[in-house]
Amino acid sequence: MGKSTLLNAILKETLCSATNRPQTTRHSILGVLTSDEQKCQLCFHDTPGVIDDPAYKLQEGMMEAVQGAFRDSDVILVITDMFSTPIPDDELFHKLNLSNKKKIVVINKVDLADKVSADPKQSPQFHMSRDNDAEPQYRRTVTVEDAVSNWRGLVPDAVAIIPMTASNGGDNAGVDALRTLLLGGEDVPKAFRALGRPIPGMFQEGVKFINDDAARELIPCGPPLYDPETLTDRTERFFASEIIRATLFTKLGKELPYCCEVRIEQFREPRPEDKKQIVRINATICVERDSQKGIVVGKGGVKIKEVGVEARQELENFLQGKVHLDLNVKVEKNWRRDEKKLKEYGYLKNW
């Protein structure tokens, strides 16, 4: 769907690692946007994607993060794209429609609208049940107008349904319209006019546009939760792990098993008196089977070396300095089902 890409675009910072593979976000990541001009602070949570039927403990922990964000948020952003249809019998989707919380739907990847087939024989179909032989109920939309209309029917009380291409960055018209709407200005109508001709269903029935005063009612008034300079509450150590894991997805593609986890064993920043100002990172890549270890390491260690070179470059860009990176691969059998390991790795809470 592009949740992480969207958060990066809203913040105009590369905070979250974004990959082309779905379901790669495992933790809820906080992103903070503070506007002195609008006297507003927004706290975003980039959550894992919704999993209708968690298959193991790790996915249960991921869904706990989703449900926690759903429960604690003032506004819910529903992120979808031209290629996606909601799961009609999904429990969380039903809770969304029953909730009185403010909702905004984001239709991402509208630049790919021409990639969606209008031919029913080529366009994948979606079912109300898990039975693939059941009668299809939904088809993928073909145009942006179709997508807006479809989602207006699915989330009728959405404050706005905003088409965008988040991968184009923070200056994309849709991203700017969303950011301006949430900040309450300046000039929300102008930001939406930049999207072009109004699309029927973009706003609720009877609403032609949202002005600054109405936009400011979306976010409750209160003191800021974080210092204006704060971008996130996560540590550099955490993001080092995420950067290495994203690099694994980039370099290994579909070969990479989803069970990969990256643990930072050492994150040593240089002392002022050190001759060489180098951040030293020692990381362990955990897989569940010996065969998966072979995929990650590659013949003669070629794959892990490629991952290390690219990850080190990404880490140096992120940390703005030299990095020495040491990678190891370890088999942790069935760690995704091990409650003790999941608590240790931060996927389940200790209580």
Image (cartoon, rainbow, N blue to C red):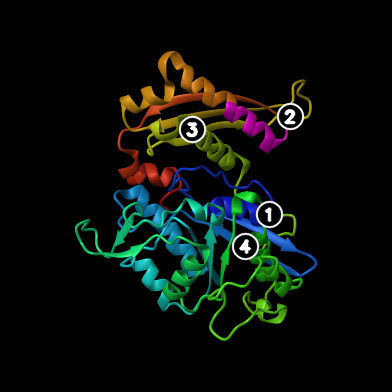
Q: Amino acid at mark 4?
A: Cys
Residue assigned mark 3: 248
Residue assigned mark 1: 170
Sequence order check: which comes first, mark 2 or mark 3? 3
**Mark 1 to mark 3: distance in Å?**
26 Å
Residue 87 location, quadrant = bottom left
Q: Secondary structure at mark 4?
A: strand
Q: Residue at x 32, y 49 (%)?
A: 57
Can residue 351 be seen from the camera position used here? no
Per the image, is 41 magenta? Answer: no
Label count reads 4
Q: Nearer the viewer, mark 2 or mark 3?
A: 3
Q: Nearer the viewer, mark 1 or mark 3?
A: 1
Sequence order check: which comes first, mark 4 or mark 1? 4
Sequence order check: which comes first, mark 3 or mark 4? 4
Q: Amino acid at mark 2?
A: Arg
Q: Position of residue 237 (x, y in %)?
A: 59, 39
Sequence order check: which comes first, mark 2 or mark 4? 4
**Mark 3 to mark 4: distance in Å?**
29 Å
**Mark 1 to mark 2: distance in Å?**
36 Å
Q: Is 339 or 181 nearer to us in this picture?
A: 181
Span of residues in magenta: 310-320
Q: Amino acid at mark 1?
A: Gly
Q: Residues within 10 Å of mark 2 (few under 14, many from 20)?
A: few
Q: Amino acid at mark 3?
A: Leu
Residue assigned mark 4: 43
Per the image, is 318 magenta? Answer: yes
Residue assigned mark 2: 271
